[in-house]
Amino acid sequence: MCTHQPPCPTADSTDHQTAVIVSAHPEQGWSLLCNGTIVFDDTGELLPDGRVVGPRRERRLLAAA
């Protein structure tokens, strides 16, 4: 899908989320990257081959006072 230079990382690359946004829909909470990956505001992803990457949630430790 990527036609610009230098080319964006492929959807299989570890840095695939750094690809250029080709279609943004912030009102719906998602964006399409030029490598075919759909990224969601909750940090979840849908890869071009149909695989789902769940949201990355920070785990916080609560300190007892």
Image (cartoon, grey):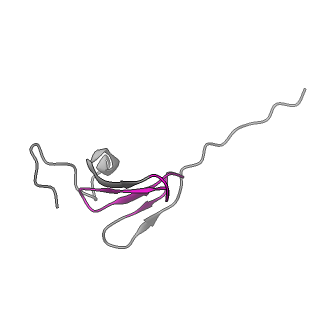
Residue 34 on the magenta span? yes
Query: Which quarter shows the N terminus?
Result: bottom left
> For residue 10, which quarter of the picture?
bottom left
Q: In the orientation shown, which residue stands out farthest toward the front?
A: 27
Taking 7 as reference, is 54 left or right?
Answer: right
Residue 19 at x, y = what percent? 27, 48
Q: Of residues 21 and 47, which is closer to you in this image?
A: 21
Front residue (pair 39, 23)? 23
Q: Quadrant of the C terminus?
A: top right
Q: Residue at x 82, y 31 (%)?
A: 63
Q: Please identify the residue farthest to the right as the structure is shown.
A: 65
Q: How many marks?
A: 0
Locate residue 56, reporting x and y percent.
54, 50
Seen in the image, is 64 located left or right of residue 29? right
Residue 60 image point, x, y percent: 69, 38
Residue lying farthest bottom?
50
Q: Is residue 21 left or right of residue 28?
A: left
Asked if residue 9 is positioned above or below residue 63 in the image, the reply reads: below
Magenta stretch bounds: 26-46
| Residue 15 position (above or below residue 36) | above
Residue at the image position 49 percent from the left and 51 percent from the top: 43
Indicate the quadrant where residue 45 lies.
bottom left
Whether the magenta-drawn stretch holds residue 17 is answered as no
Name the residue: 24% across, 58% down: 35
- Residue 53, position as x, y percentages in the image: 46, 61
